Amino acid sequence: MYLANPRVRNISLSIRWSDRHYATGPYASLATCQRPATLIRMRIGAHVRLDSDPIGFGEKLGADLVQLFVVDPQSWDKPAPHPRTDEILASPIDVVVHSSYQINVASLNNRLRMPSRNAVAQQAKAAADLGAFGLVVHGGHVRSDAEIEDGIVNWRKLFERQRDKGGFAVPILIENTAGGNHAMARRFDMIARLWDAVGEFGAGFCLDTCHAWAGGEDLVGVVERVQAITGRIDLVHLNSSRDEFDSGADRHANFADGTIDPQLLAEVCRTAGAPVILETPADGLAEDLAYLREHVG
């Protein structure tokens, strides 16, 4: 459940309204999406390494969109207004926000779960203030198999309680994760259980290719399998992996150096048809983007 925010620029898969409202994706049912659509190239960008100047970073890279944090990703800080908000809102480069890493709304530990709920709501509001089209949140984990069902219930409570407050300011895009025996979004069978609990609230999905690979999910046909579960892919984190299949290790690599066939990554990108964010190492980031432009965009 999220609020309709007229300042948020919703991203489409490959179809876009001329006034920057889009035909598909999390806001597709809104009344604003009523104009004829025109096809454009797939929108590809990267995670910002310099949060102080995200648009400058995107322009230098030639990106269509950028992903950034609104707080130190290792902190519980409350987001402050971004000093370049006006520039971000005025730019044709679209924005998505990644939540801080310590958030775990599935946890049964009140001292972790309650701050996590607050942080999701606060960071979603900060994302909306920047015109972002979503907030990416990791699926989190619990401590044992016995806690898994409660972890799923806690995810549902996140949406239920925010619905009673009017909804989130932007769509929450749940991201699959790479490791952990009790992760809520590593294996696709667990994602299916999670989606049964939260799908009705308008939750979105972010597919990370490194996480899927390291988590033991074959990337051949991965888009179709995810869409059969969630009905959607709103964003792709297109990353290779430094480690072998099913390693459980979340270590991203550039396309030329990783263990995933770059042609397979390009195929995931083409098949998903969703906006793409690269989170690969900085030294080869420009080359990764150029490879995608050549093979996809």
Image: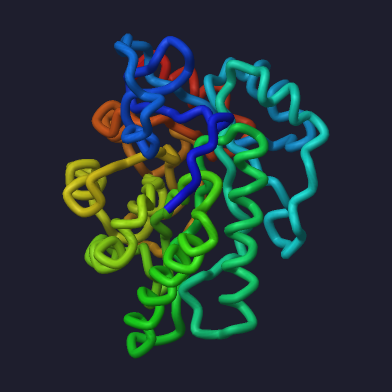
The image quadrant that residue 165 belongs to is bottom right
Residue 251 lies, with reference to residue 107, above or below; the image says: above
In the rendered image, residue 105, in percent from the top left (x then y), is placed at 51, 70
Q: Nearer the viewer, residue 178 or 160?
A: 160
Q: Is residue 244 visible?
A: no
In the rendered image, residue 253, in percent from the top left (x then y), is placed at 50, 42
Left or right of 215 on screen, residue 224:
left
- Residue under the image location 33 percent in, 85 percent down: 145
What is the residue that sits farthest to the bottom in this orientation? 146
- Residue under the image location 32 percent in, 55 percent down: 245
Circle count: 0
Left or right of 139 on screen, residue 103:
right
- Residue under the image location 34 percent in, 90 percent down: 146
In the rendered image, residue 100, in percent from the top left (x then y), is placed at 63, 57
Colour scheme: rainbow
Q: Is residue 243 visible?
A: yes
Left or right of 15 on screen, residue 257:
right
The image quadrant that residue 149 belongs to is bottom left
Q: Quadrant of the C terminus?
A: top left
What is the residue that sits farthest to the right in this orientation? 83
In the rendered image, residue 281, in percent from the top left (x then y), is placed at 59, 38
